Structure formats: C-alpha cells, structure tokens
Amino acid sequence: MTALPVAWFLALSGALLAVGIFGLLTRRNFILILIAVEIAMNATILNFVYFAAFATSGTGLSGQAIAVVLIGFAATEVAVGLAIVLGLNRLKGSINVAQANELKE
Amino acid sequence: MVGLFGTRLQKLEWGGWLAVGFAGAAMALGVTIAIGEMLNPGAYVNAQYTWLHLAASPGPFPNGLSLVAGTLVDPLSALMLLVVTVVGFLVMLYSIGYMHHDRGLPRYYAELSLFLAAMTGLVLSNNLLEFFLFWELVGVCSYFLIGFYYEKPSAASAAKEAFLVTRVGDVLFLLGIFIYFFHYATTGPNGGWAANGFVFTNGTTPFLPAGAIGSSTLLTIAGLLILGGAAGKSAQFPLHVWLPDAMEGPTTVSALIHAATMVAAGVYLLAVTSVFIGFTSTDQLAIVAIGGFTAFFAATMAVVHPDIKRVIAYSTISQLGYMVMAVGAGFAMVGLFHLFTHAFFKALLFLAAGSVIHAVGTQDLFKMGGLRKPMRVTAAAFAIGGLALAGIPPFAGFWSKDDILSAVYSQLGSHPLYWPFFLLAFAAVFLTAYYIFRAWFLAFSGDHPRDPSLPHAHEGPWVMQVPLVILSGMALIAGLFIFLPNFQGLLLHGDGVAGIPPVYGSTDLLLSGVSVGLGLAGIGLAYQLWGNGRVYVLPADSPWQSVRRLLLNRYYMKVAYDWIGLRAVYGISRGADFVDRYVIDGTVHGFERIFGSLSDRLRAMQSGVVSDYAAYVIAGLVGVFALLLLVAPYLLAHFGGT
Amino acid sequence: MDFTSFVGPFVPEILLLGGTLLIFLLDVLGLRRNEWLSTVAVTAVVLALLSVLGDLGFGPLSVLATLSPGQIDTLPAFGSAPLYHFTSLGLVFQAIFLLSALLVTLASASRPSDEPGAPIFYGLLLLATLGMLLVAVASDLIFLLLAIEVVSIPSYLLVGYRRRETRSMEAAMKFFIIGALSTVLSFYGASLLFGAYGTTNLFLIQADASTVGFPVLVLLGYGFLVAGLAFKVTLVPFHAWAVDVYDGAPSDVSAFLAGGTKKIGLFAFFLVFLGPVLLVNTAAAGQSPFGGGAVDLGPTLSITLGVLAVVTMTVGNVLALLQKEMKRMLAYSSISQAGYMLIGITIGTAPALTGATLQIFAHVLMKGGAFLVVAGVGALGIGPLIDDWKGFGVRRPLTGAAFALMLLSLAGVPLTVGFVSKFILFSAAVQAEGWFIWLAVAGLLNSALSVFYYARVLKVMYFDRPGPLETAEGTAAAASAPALGAGGLGYGRAVAIGLAAVLIVGVGLYPQPVVGAIQMAAQHFVSAGV
Amino acid sequence: MFPVLSTLLATLLVGTVLTFLSGKYARWTALLVSFAFLAEVGYLLMYFPGWPGLAGGVPQFADSESYAWIHLGWLQVNYTVGIDGISLVLIFLTAILQIATVVYSWEEQKKPAAWFGLLLLTCLGCVGVFVALDVLLFFLFWEAVLVPMFFIIGYWGGPRRRYAAIKFFVYTHVASIVMLVGLLALVFYSGATSFDYSSVFAAAPTLGVATQAFLFLSLFFGFGVKFPVVPFHTWLPDAHVEAPTGGSVLLAGLLLKLGGYGLIRWAVFVLPLGFHEVQPILFVIAFASIAWGSIVSLAQRDLKRLVAFSSINHMGIVLLAIALGSSLGLLAAVLLMFAHGVVSALLFMTAGSVHHTYGTRDIASIGGITPTTPTLSTMVMVGSLASLGLPWLISFPAEFTALLATWDGLAYWVLIPLGILVVTAAFYIWMMQRMLFGPPKGVPPTAHDLPWYETAGMGILAGAAILFGVLPFLLVNLITNSPIRGFAGL
C-alpha cells in the first residue's frame, strides 16, 4: 500500500485547521464558533491517525489511542461550551459573542 | 594669638564698654608686640595647629601635605598689628559716642570685635592659607557691618556688592595660592614646603628663597592672581566699585575697615607675598600699573563727588593705589609705611567726617557749610587729616607719600615702563589736595549751612573727641617715626630678605618740592573755587560738563557691572531655569507622555470583542512562526550561535 | 507493580479527589453551608500540601513522604515511555499550586454561609487543583495537554459559576472561546511533533531531537505549542482574554487564576521546551534560509521565547500604566510578570529555572494575595476603580499595609520576595552571559516602568484624601455588610492575606530555605531531563 | 568579637518598630533611639581601631561581620558588614542629622508615630548602605531607603507632594535598576566567587578595560541620579520643594550622600581601569552640574528650590573631586559630602521655618525678616555663608581641598568651579539681601521667633558646621583611615 505523501496530507489537515480557525474568527454566533472549534479539532485527530502509520518506536501512546481520547475530550469541551451558551443566552437573550463586550480596555 | 574678645558677651548693657576694654587690652598687647619687634627684629613663629594633614602619597606631595594655622611675628606683621590695634581701639572708643542712638548695638560690637580678632589673625598668619581664612572672615565682617543698617535697601545692596566684588578677588587669590603651593611643594628644608604647612618662614629664615624668581609664566600668573585678590580687597581698579558704596555702613566702620585696616589687607598681602615668595618682573609692572592708574583714576572721581564720605572713600582708593604701586616697584616696606601713616590720617578724616554727619545728619557737602565755628575740634582734625593726605610737610602723609614717589622714581631708570604710571600718580597728588580741601571748604568754611533745614550742629561727646585728638596727633607725628632708629629698623630689617631698599633718606629734594608744590597748588585751587562759602558752578555749556557727568557716574563702571550682574548673569540664569524646567524636565515628562499615549493606544485594542482576541491569537501564531522560521535563523546566522 | 507503589505517589491527588467527591456528596445531601464546605476544601488542600512537602523532604515533614527516594528524579529505563514521572521540581510546583489553592480556599471561608453556588465553587476548585498537580508530573505531551484541560474546563465553569452575573458569564464565554482555540493549537502542535518523532513522550522526543527527519514539521509543531501554551501563560499577544476574565470573574477566582492556573502553563513550558532549548549548537532543524549552516533548534526556540518574554513584559506594563480599575491593573501586571517568568525557560539553566520558579512562587503570594484583598474589600464599600481606594491605607492600616506590601513586592522593592525572585532571575540571566544579559536589562527596565503604576496605587491609598462621597458610600456599605470578623474581611480571608504577607516578607528576608530547595530541584531537572 | 555594626542596625530597626507602635509617645521613643544610636556611633568613633589596610591588595574593614545569607553555589550572597573611615564619617553624619531632625520636628501633629518611624527607617537604610559590604546587601539598603522617603514626601509634603513622591520614586528607582545590572554584571563577568566586596574587588581586575568602562558607566548612572548630576537632576528640586522639612533634611543630608559613597566605594575603588576610561565624561558632567546648579539657583524664587539647586552645585563639586581620582580628591569628596550634609540640612530647616513662620517660601514676597525672627535669620546666615564656602565653616576645608585637588589634576580647569564660587556667593548673598534685610515686607503680625525645638535642631547643625569648620582635622584624620590613604591614583 502506498502511503499518502506527507505534504499532501499535511495540506489536508492544515486546510481543515484553517477552515476551523476562519470560522472561529468570522462567526459571531456562539454555536457556530463551537462547531468551528470542532472542525479544527478534527484536523488534529486526523493528524494523529495519519502519523500513527509512521510511528515506528512503538512505545508510549499510539496515535490511534490518542485520537480516541481526543474525540472524547472534544465532546466534553462542547458540553461545557453549551453550558456557557445557555448561561449567556439566559442573561443576555442573545448568543452573539460580539454583544458581550462589557469588559474592555 | 589675641583672642576672640568674648564676642558673645555683648548682649549686656555695657557690652560696648566691654568691647572697648578688650580692644584696649588688644591694643596694649599689640603695641607691646610691636615694640618688642622693634627692639629685637626677627621672625617669631609660635605654636601652630595642623588643620588638615595628608600622609605621604604619590603625586604632587611626595612627603605629605599639611595645612596649618599658626602665628608669625615679624616686622611686617608688627607694623600692621600696631595699626590694627591702635586704630581699632580708637574707633571702638569713638563708637561709644557715635553709635549710642542706634539699635542693635550688641550686634555692632560683636561684629566689630570679631572683625578686629580676624584682622589680628590675618596679620599674624604664618602661611597663605591661614591668611586666606582670616581674609575671608574680615570680608564677612565687613559685609555685616556695611549692612548694619539692613533696613535700608541701599545698605543691604551695598553689602551684597562689597561681598561679591571682593569674592571675585578672593577666588583669584585662592587660585594663586594653589599655584604657589604646587609649584613650591617640595622646595625647602624638612621635606619641602608642603610637608611643613606652607609656612612663610621656618624660624629665622624664610622658607622660600624669595627675591629674584625669574620670569616663569606660571609664577607670573600666580602673581597676577594674587594681585587680583589684593585688588578686590584694596578696591583697586577694576574691582574698586564696592568701596564707595560701602560707605552705607556706619562711619566708624568706614574709618576702621574701609580706610585703615581691612582694605589695607590687600596691600599687606602684596607686601607679604613680595617678601616671602616674590613677584616676577611682569607682575611688578602689572602691580605698578594698577596702583598708579588707580591712584589717579580714583582721585578724579573724588573731584566732583558731593558726598563727604564718598570723597574720602575715593581718596582711600587712590591712596591704596600709591601703596600698591610702591609694593609693586619692589618697596614693600615703603608701601607699608604709607599704609601706617594713611591708617591714622584716613581714620582721622573718617571720624571727623563722622563727627560732622553725627552733628548735621547728612552726608551731602552742598547742604553743609559754616561748620567751623560750632565744631572747632572736628574742623581742625579734618584739616590736619587733609593736610596729611595732601602731602604737606611735616604731616604724616608727606613723608610716606614722598617716600613712595621717590622710591618709584628711583626705579624708572631700569624700568622705563613705570613712567606713565609714575606720572599718573604724580598728577594725582594735585587732585588729592584739591578734592580734600574742596570738601573741607564746603563743609567748614562760610557762615552757615547752605541747607537751612539742617539741625544746629554741635560737637560730639568726649568719647568722640578724644580719638579725634589722638589721631590728629598721630597724623602729625606718624611720619616722623621714621626718624626713630628702632622704627626705621623695623622697616629696614626686612626679614632677612636681601634687596629691601632703604626707606626714607634718599630724598630727592626736587621731587619733594614738585610734589609739595602740586599739593599746595591743589589747595589753592580749592580755595579759589570753594573757599569762604563760595560754590563754584560749572557753566552748563562748558565742554567739561561731559567729563563731569562721566566722573559723577563713576565712568559708568558700576552701571556696567550692574548690567553684567542683573541683566547678563541673571538673564542667563533665567534662561537656564527655563531650560531646566521645560527642556530637561520636559524630556522626562516626554517619556511619561510617550508611554501614556502608548498605553492608551494599546488599551484601545482591548476591544471587549472575543473575536478580536482570537484574531490576536492567530496573529501571535503567525508571529511565532515568523520568529522561528525567519527572525531567529537570521539572527543566528549573523550574530553567531550565542 | 504493586498497588501501594502505584497509588502512593498520588496521595495528594487522591486527597483532592476525595475532597471533591465529599463536597459534591454534601451538596447532594443538602449540606451546603459555606463553613462546612470550606473546611473540607481547606483540609484536603492542607493535607495534600503536607504530603507534597513531605515528599520534598521538607524538614520533619519528611515522615509524611509517600514517594520513595528512588521514585524522584530518576530517569526512566531506556526505551520506556512513561506517562508520568516524578521530579523534585514538579513537586515544588505542586507545592506552589497547593499554596495558591490554600490561599483561595482559606479566604473563601469568610463568605456568607448561605452563599449560592458554594459547592460548585469548592468542588471545581479542588478539581482544577487536581489537574494542576497532574500537570506537574506529566512526562508525555498528550498527558500534559489533557491535564491542562483538566484544569481549564473547571476554570471556565469557575469563572461563570455565579450564573446571575452578566460580567462573570461574559468572562466565562471569552475564556472558553480563546481556551478552546488554544487547545486546538496545542493539540495540533502535538500532532505535528508526533508526526516528526513518532512519539509524544517527552523523554523520547528529547532523545531524538537531534536526529529528526522533518525539520520544518518540528519547528511548526513547536510554534503551535508555543501559541497554545502561551494562552495559559498569558503571553502577549495571546493575553487579551486574561484581563477581561480576571476582571469579570469573582475576585477569589481571579486570585486562583492569576496565582494558580496560569503557572501550569509555565511548568508546561519547562517540560516541553527545556529539552530542545538546551540543544545548543546541535544541528537539528535543517538548513537555515540565511546560510550559515544548519538551524540550531535550541537557540532558535530560545530567541523566540526571549522575544515573546520581552514583548510580554513590556506590553503588559505599558497597558497597566494608565489603567483606572484595580482588578484590570492587577491583570495587566500579571501579564507582564509572565514575561519575567518566561525568561527562566528562555535561558534554560538551573539558576534561571530557580529564578523563574521563585518568581512563580512569589507571584502566587503577591498577585494571589492582592486579588484576595480586592475580593475582601468589595464588602467594605471599595469600588472597582483605583480612585475608590483613596485613603484606604490610612483608614485600614493593617489591610492597607498588607496590600501595599504586595504591590511593593510586585514592583520588586527589596526586603520582599518579589525582589529576591527578580534578583535571582536576572542574576541568572547575567550569569548565563551571551545575549541573555539583554533579557535582564529588559526585565529590569520593565520593572522600573512598573514601579510607576504601583506607586500610583500607593499614592491613592495613602496620599489622596477620600472625597465626602466615597466616605459616605464606604460607611454605608460597611454598615450594610455582613458582620464579619477581622475588620470586615472575615477571619479566613485575614489569615490568608496575613499568610501571604508573612511569606512575602519572610522569604524576602531569608530566602535560603526556599531558594535552596528550588535550586536543588532545578538542578536535578536540568541535569536529569524531563 | 562583639557584632557592633549589627547592633547599630538592630538599634534602628527595633527603634523603628517601637516608634511605630508607641503612638503619641513616638517622639520620645524616637529621641531615645536617636540618642542610643548616637551613643553607639560615639562608641564606634572612640574605639575605631583604624583602617586595617590592604591584604593582598584588597582593602580590609574594621568591625567586620559576615554571615551566610543566600548560598546557591553560583550565587553566594552573604550578610557582610564592615566600616572604614569613609563609612564611619558618614554614619556619624547620619547620627547628627537623625537627632537634629527628630528634635526639629518635635511637634509634628500629623500621625507622629508614622512620621518618626519613617524618619528612623530612612536613617536605617542609609546606615545600611554605609556598612554593607555585599553587593546585594548594599543594593537592598539602597533601595530600602526609597520606600520611607516616598511615604514621607507623599504623605507629609506640600501641595504637589503626590507628583513629587512618584517622580522621586520612579526616577531614582530606574537609576537603581540600571545600577543593579551593572552590579550583577560586575559580579558575574569578573567571575567573583561571591557577592562580597572583597571577592568582587579581587576579581574585578580580570575584566578588560572596555568592560570595566561599560560597567562603570552603568554604576555611575545609578549613583549619578542619586547625586544628582545634570541632566538627571530634575527629580531633586521637585522632591525637595514638596517634601516636608524633615524629609528635605534627610533627602539632602543623607540620600544624596549615598550616591557619592557608592561611587567611591563600589565604582572608583573596584573598577580603576574603567574609571580611568570614563574620567573625561565624569569631568564634563561634574562641570556641567557645578555650573548649572549654581546658575539656575540664581533664578529661583522659592527658597527650597534655591537650596536644592545649590545642592546640585555642591554635589557636582563632590563628583569633580571623585573624578580626579587622587587621594586628595577623594578626601575632599568625602569631606564635602559631610559638609554638605550638615549645611544643606541646616538650610532646609531654615526654609521650613521660614515657610511656617511667614506662610511662604517665596523670596521675593517677604523681606526684612531679621527684626521679627532674629534667630531664624541668624541660622539662614550661618547656613548660607557655610554653603558658599566661607572659611571657619565646614564647607570651606572641603571645598578648598577639592579645588586644590582640581588644580593638581586639571590645572586651569579649576577656573570653572572657582568662577562658579562667585555665582554661588551671589545667589546666597542676594537671597539674604532680599529676604533678611531691607524694610519688613510680608511679615504677618503673628510672626514670632522660632520655637525651642526648631532652634535646637538647627543649633545642632550650626554647631557642627562651626566645630568642624574650625577643626576639620577631626574629620580628616578619620576619613583618611580608609583606602583613600595611599590611594595610588590614576
């Protein structure tokens, strides 16, 4: 089996990361920001899975194991994020992050 | 050393008498010392204490450096001591009467006593530094006494002026001391001058081989600096401006400090320096030039002045010029002799003038007149003083002034450059006689005061008259002392320094005759213009008016000095203050402003919108990549691995 | 591996976990009085602290040691890739973390007994502390990052635990979003390193660092990690969240964040970057685009971190200069202090690590203590602005003196621990020679700059007279405040502030015991590797 | 050996604490502490064994003590103290000023406990600087002085006290920081085995000339701001004008001396090669300070500002004397520091008394105060005359020696300080003319002469000014009991 060339693969995961970051920067809706974070996180997870194929040392955590752990972690993070969304929505009646700018300077 | 007279006891009612008592005791001691010196001339060094000591160290003082204070009695100091203590005592006595209306007498007597103590110390100093210490102390006493009537702004201002002008001289003097100290640091026995406290003399022989000291540039400069110091103290051109203004002080102070003693300290300094250290020939020419010029220059200003005290003050400057010239020409003792006689007749003139002022309450000659009748003693005393000043034999001034003129004359052959100054001094003889008798006629002749509002004049109390009488006697006979063998010995002994020329004796009769003739001519002119209550008024269209204005305005030198002081220096100072506040401190505040505005701008980036913060994070990420991939490799490549 | 030797080392963590569980249990049982909950929390933290100190061999406390000497500072067997590993420097950090938790829990004991949300507060606090302790023993990149998340996630919630306060919730939102972004960046960096080295174990990465095959990948990986971790440490320009969060969070939580959790980022920096930074002159990362041979990974990272440190301290200080609100000023000052601490890892020598660690220790006391004071005086009618503190030092001499002491210590004035730490840190920079002296110069000039705003606060506290309005408001607020002991601060808070103040002066006067221990640990850390 | 220097420091430390605690009896405590301190200084003076000289080229110190403080291997800091003539004379100055200040401010009404406590604390810091023989200990005391002075200016000061306090604190702190960099570099670049003075001294010659010069400059920046030298002086007038009288006294009398002391002890002696390199810079700065301080003084209307600028002038002479690098110059510098300490303190006291007697310090708006307040007027005269270098008062021997040394080192350049002496005289004399003399002006009807405690405070200083002016050898013999003796010069 011929492995996908590293550069190609990195371009893919990099693009995924860029999409996530772009979304995070441009969206004002908290929920959309959460989704953008998840997209970026997936770039990381993808990386681990891909690089696991190259890992020869065989000691320590394997890439696949890390990927699984990260998927679980991402879920936790989203849960906490949603809790904050709820709190914010209840107080401000909006989940637009740009409107929460009471604290500044 | 003659002690400090218990200056702090003066708070008591009888403080004045106490001060007089101490002054009397000092006089007795001083006279005793002087007589002792006359009987057995020589240099006596008494106990000294080390003021500052530095152990041997590399550099200019390989054998260590000592600065000491001690006493030295030699013919010079004996003569001065005599003057200081006698005139001091008489003035103190006179003060009892003259000053009894004034407030602040304890202060007056304390300061006067301190002055006498300091003056005595100065006279007895055995090295230049100690000399300087007392020199400054008499200066500050003079400052306080000129400003005795401190409520008067003019008095306070005159005191300031006196202090500052003499300060200029002091600074030059100090530098002169430095040069001598360093130049001669290792000269002489016992490890050199520096290790021995720079004392003038080591027992019986002077420490430095004074006399012909060649023509070293450095020493010439040192000599000129010493001359500068002396000029400040003795009010020689161009540092003379303070002395006429110093007449703001009580007349007694003028008599003692600004006629007899302190102002003579400059001459004394020159004399001491010329005897123990020596001047180069350039210095000598400079001293003669300053002295001769000042003698004439000051006399011209006295010619027109309406203030009785200032006329005498200008005369003092002029007479000091003679002394300076004598010392400069190499005749230290001749100069001191004139100092000796001058002290008496000038003190006499001042005290007499004081008596007049005390009686009529003004110093303006044109308001006075006809005072001869109510004030016979004073009028006689003033006349005696005036004759002495004018150099009419047999009064004291004749002998000493004539001595100076003939001494300088004797040098003209070898020093042709002295000629112009000699002639100036000679011309001043005429002016001197004229102005002093102008003053006498204005004040005493005639029938009544020209200003009718003046109070009825009367003679002062006995304590004022006694000193007048004594001083009149001295003004008569002091010049004749020269014929006493012991006194002459004092003048001739010269501390074992070779080359002190003989004093009186080589009289050139022609010279004396011319000088006396000039004096008489001056008196005659004065009588012609001012005698018998006449008042000479220069026609308004006379071409001499401009000269008169120039003289009355003191050649505009005071204006110029005031301009320098008030406009130039103060202006610079205001400018500097401005720069300090707004440029230097402004720079400091500039930093504050820069950081402040930076802070404001940076805080404006803290917008409160979380997306902006995320953008900063991404920008930071890019920045980190730039650092890692571009900046750091660049730095490492160009500045090495460290 | 028998059970005791496996569990033994984790006694502090277990104590904290137990405390957390007990608190949640009490919550469930409805026993929500603040006194009880705080007692549990304080007890757990104190016991954990004693245990850590015991492991460090701190005097008579060593009888409490649960680690056998062989378990500390020993390199793992060749080829093995442990997830965690005990170093004495890690234990020192554990002690520091526990100290910050102790101060906060002690101070919180002064709250009203019916404080809403108390169980959540204490529970999350202990949980976050547990995460911090785990950070200190990590030896695997993923373990480390997950441990950091164990701290972060409770922190987000701690900031927003007062659910009725808009400002807190806004702070929590900002904290969360930037935190999530940073997490992504960190993990992405870790994934790139995993790609380059084939492992996430820090020992193995360090061992392989010189023989790596993908130079750009390594640099990119470290770049992402720097950015991700910089969030926790609040390096400029990753700092912007911190000010708003410290400001919006309840002040006790701010104390915990500024004094405690940001330090885990620094220890993470130590763990991740010490190995590479020390790789001086070891060709590692391929051709330099500027010629001059291979890029040296060590110096490259060192320069990057150095620049970040200088930028951070400078910008933080400049931002603080004209700040009008007390908490935000403290927050900006906290940012600039992070710059100083980063100097330690930039240099990477044992002295530098000693200095940085001491600076971290000092910061817990100074900044943590200051936030505790700020939290306490709110009840005394002191508003959020610096100008609200007019005359405070004169009216409340003791509290004022303690606060002034903390500010002076932050400014690096002698006889305080803040001075000693900066002194040692900058000494180390000078001692390291080379360009590092410029770090010392920059740091010192910055500390001079910082004096300006600390002095301004002192001026307000001591020299300005309170206006009538402030006096009246203060009196009213003080009257309506719940009657607490210790001059309205409450005893727990007073003890916490006092403890901080005493330690500031005590260690400032005689730092030898503390510095000696830290230096020993730092030496092991540098020589033994992670 | 009995740890006499530690006792000295402990006296002040314990005294400070007691004073803080003793409420309205603080002044008595402070006085007691001051006397105890003076007694200890007297003991030191009486049993001063003399300077032990050099051992292996390194200066030794009397009464020295050393205890380990922070030992980290690469960083060996000790608590090391010791004295020689230079420090002893300055400690003596501290003792005099301390008593005078405590007595002068006897009736301080505003938080007296804190006031007297901070006064003692300031003195403690200064004494610490004078005895410290360890880089860190030195710096520690150096900085510790700032804090009490900051509070003294800021709490008890005049209308712009807040601004002045912060300016003082920040400005001098910045300078100290630069100095600290220099000190650290000195220790580590020279490879000194510890922070002790002796080990730094012994190791410093290994540094190259360029390094020494660079280090010297960085140290000089720290000391120079404290001096202060032009152009880093602008904190001083503000601090002085706004500081309360006692603060000004300690500021001018003691704090400025720290700069001179530090420069001699830690820069000139330790880095002779660097010193030699930067000598021209020092000369330029010294001349600038001398001229600038004096000329700007002339334009001042505020009495305190005038004295402040005259301090810049005098400290400029100190710097000049130090910069000469000769045995004589150093002697003059220390002597002048002592003199200036006494005289400027006296002048600031008079300025304070003028202010609260007449309600203003504006020279132009009061005049003829002598009849109303003769004692005050006398003190102004004594202070001014002493300050302008009148013989028989304390400044003269110092200035004379300084100028003598200047002639030795720089020949005709001495004309600058000499000429400036006239300007100095001018502004003092002019001030006296305007303020003391002339017709009374701006004299409130309630004005009366000084209370006893102010007279006593000034009297102590005036007495010292006269005593040591007449008998300067008392000080000189002490000062030369130090590395100044036989200092090889440059």
Image (spheres, rainbow, N blue to C red):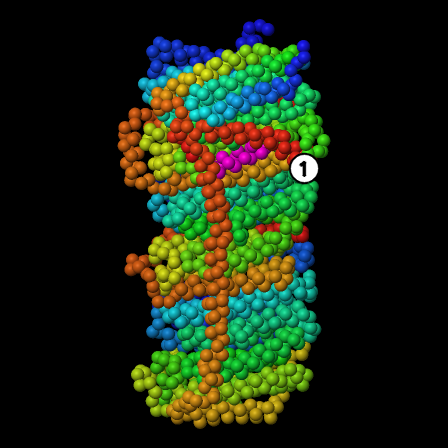
Figure check: D150 above or below C83:
below
Figure check: D229 above or below C19:
below
Image position of B67 (left or right of D380): right
Place of residue D260 in the rendered image (x, y in percent of width and height, measured from the top left): 55, 49
Place of residue D370 in the rendered image (x, y in percent of width and height, measured from the top left): 37, 63
Read off the chain for label 1: B
Q: Is residue B215 visible?
A: yes
Residue at 57%, 78% in the rendered image: B290
> Which quarter of the picture shows residue B293?
bottom right
Q: Mark 1 points at which residue?
A: B639
Label 1 crowd bin: few (<14), some (14–19), many (20+), radius 10 Å: few
Residue at 55%, 90% in the rendered image: B515
> Which quarter of the picture shows residue B606?
top left
Is residue C424 on the magenta stretch? no
In this rendered view, identify the residue nearer to me: B218 or D341.
B218
Place of residue B513 in the rendered image (x, y in percent of width and height, measured from the top left): 57, 93
Place of residue C97 in the rendered image (x, y in percent of width and height, measured from the top left): 49, 22
